[in-house]
Amino acid sequence: MQKRKVGLALSGGGARGLAHVGVLTVLEKEGIPIDMIAGTSIGAIIGAFYTGGKDISQIKNAVMSLSRRKILSLVDLTLPKTGFIKGKRIKDWLKSIIGDIDFEDLKMPFACVATDIMTGEEVVIKQGSVLEGVRASASMPIIFTPAKWQGRYLVDGGLVDPVPVRVLRQMGADFVIAVNVNPYISDRTEGVDKEQIENLKAPNIFSIVIRTLNIMEYQAAMSGLKEADVTITPKVGHIGPGNFHRGRECILRGQRAARHALPEIKRQLEA
């Protein structure tokens, strides 16, 4: 019987996406074959690390180094004409980990998803510079300046395809495992009593932008997840998208969710 090609879709979601590292840890340890990866935003970053040949321990070390101080050092503010952060320092950080490589140099097929801010079209990047693709996929609107790629201005792919399951189908995947860290907005207040909710501080402009994107991404994610064979959903809704200093917790929750999904993954792959 011909072996099925397994694709792994890694969602966007800011710091919550560090749970992807925990998922990869479990899948690799259990010998689940991954033939291709597609990622959006933070999912594109983790996907680039993995397909670029970095082992799990190297990826963990890279993301665990993202303390508040480290994050601040990666912020290069610019005049807010199209965004507040230029993104060059983040690109340099990515380059220091995976190098300046092309998609054809990766150990397996990989694709980044971005959004053309002028047309609203989904843009799938799987050729040329990996750094350019990841930079485009992770460019949160308003926060980051758009990335210019082949004459187009691109922003975060989460606007159109937060969990790129369909992209993997188009790449030839027969079996797709989707990892979704986009919680419904109400998950952020799970376990919080009524009095605490009433006393919540009014959101600032940045949190409004992020929450707006979260709501949009959740709705788009639900559509894409219907086409996945198995969905892994780490419980990270209580973690803010900017809380990269909580990487250890995200990774552990990713491991827990992956272990929970393992029986179903093995059952379907062995069927």
Image: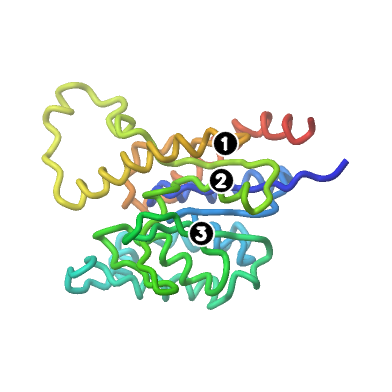
Q: Quadrant of the C terminus?
A: top right
> Along the horizontal axis of the image, is 229 left or right of 93?
right
Percent x, y of residue 210: 27, 48
> Along the horizontal axis of the image, is 227 left or right of 209?
right
Residue denoted by label 1: 227
Instruction: Please tell me whether mark 2 sits on a helix, a strand or a loop.
Output: helix
> Along the horizontal axis of the image, is 252 left or right of 213?
right
Within 10 Å of disc 1 (Cα), the crowding (few <14, some 14-19, many 20+) is some
Circle nearer the N terminus (1, 2): 2
Pick out the residue farthest to the top: 194
Percent x, y of residue 122: 44, 55
Q: Are marks 1 and 2 in contact (CB under 8 Å)?
A: yes
Residue type indicated by callout 2: Arg
Residue type indicated by callout 1: Glu
Residue denoted by label 2: 166
Q: Is residue 248 above or below residue 266?
A: below
Q: CA distance from mark 1 to mark 2?
A: 7 Å
